[in-house]
Image (tube, rainbow, N blue to C red):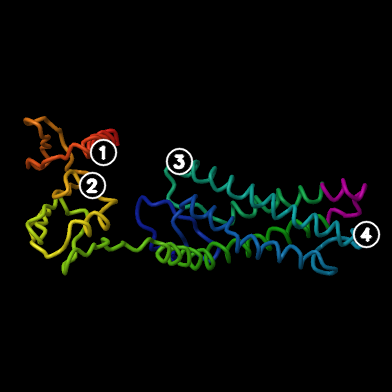
Amino acid sequence: MRQSNAEVSAGELRLIFADGSSVPFAVRELVATIRHRKVLALTCLFAVLLALPGGAAFSEEVPLWARLVLNLFSVALFTVLYPALLQEAFRAATKRGMRVVYEPCITVFSALITTLAVEALTVFLMGQSVLTRWDLALKLGFGAVFWELHITMMLLFMGPALKEQEAARAKVAEPVPQQPTLVRIGNMQFDPASLLRIETDDHFLIIHTSGATARVLAPMSEVQKRLEPYGLLAHRCHWVAFAELGDIRRQGRSFIMRTASGHEVPVARDRRKAVDEAATERAGA
């Protein structure tokens, strides 16, 4: 992720850090890094530590609870303000044809606004301000340095690590392609999706699939039980897959169905209604 300024390719908008390193100016990735739960947790931890006595430029009159509130408020405000300024900087740079944008300009400006907002909230909570102009200048400088170091560390160092972790987690979460469930008929196994129709031949079954025909020693009752989710018996000697169900016509006193693959299969009188309903449901789906 780190590249020197000299390695910036022509026509590519880059975000340049204070040490000269750069990253592609991808607003969505940068904002995702800033708002990542680990980054926010670490930022809030820093805010709590800085609220302790001697940890920041607060006056002694500001109680600990107020320091905690003010520092956490600054984190929330910066988390909203910084991405907004990133977006505006990206638009302005793209509009003006710029190749690079310097990250400290965005961070320092965000830090100054955040620090001034915190001071205004301090005055609101305490009812007065005991800071001199020099104290305020020190606080502005402290805020700019803190946020600059923090943002540089987050984007330049934690960003690539978080991206790799998310990629690894997504790879692990990818569903493993499931192997087709095979159904055993007699001493052979078949992919149910490839079955078209099955007919009896004495004690044997002639199994027609999309690619071949097999002859196995097995009863039709075994087929009816194991292949119930994939088809139905049109006749006591003929099983047909749902995808093969077709139109039924009367032939004398019997009924004949022409399957989707063009074969004719007898349909028993007591099974005609079930076959019709299954074919209609299949057509509706």
Residue depth check, mark 3 versus mark 4: number of the one nearer the observer? 4
Image location (x, y in percent) of residue 141: 73, 59
Mark 3: few/some/many CA within 10 Å (<14, 14-19, 20+): few
Image location (x, y in percent) of residue 111: 68, 53
| Residue on which the image places disc 4 | 61
Residue depth check, mark 1 versus mark 4: number of the one nearer the observer? 1
Is disc 2 in contact with disc 1, using a CB cutoff of under 8 Å? yes
Residue depth check, mark 4 versus mark 2: number of the one nearer the observer? 2
Whether the magenta-drawn stretch holds residue 131 is answered as: yes
- Between 243 and 57, the residue placed more toward the observer is 243
User: Is residue 159 left or right of 178 when viewed as pictured?
Assistant: right
Quadrant for the N terminus, please: bottom left
Residue 96, numbered circle: 3
Give the CA separation, mark 2 to mark 1. 9 Å
Residue type at mark 2 is Leu
Q: Which residues are magenta?
A: 121-134
Dot 1: element: helix
Image location (x, y in percent) of residue 36: 57, 58
For the point 72% across and 59% down, the residue is 143
| Residue on which the image places disc 2 | 232
Whether the magenta-drawn stretch holds residue 48 is answered as: no
Give the CA separation, mark 3 to mark 4. 48 Å
* Rendering quarter of residue 51: bottom right
Residue type at mark 3 is Arg
Dot 2: element: strand
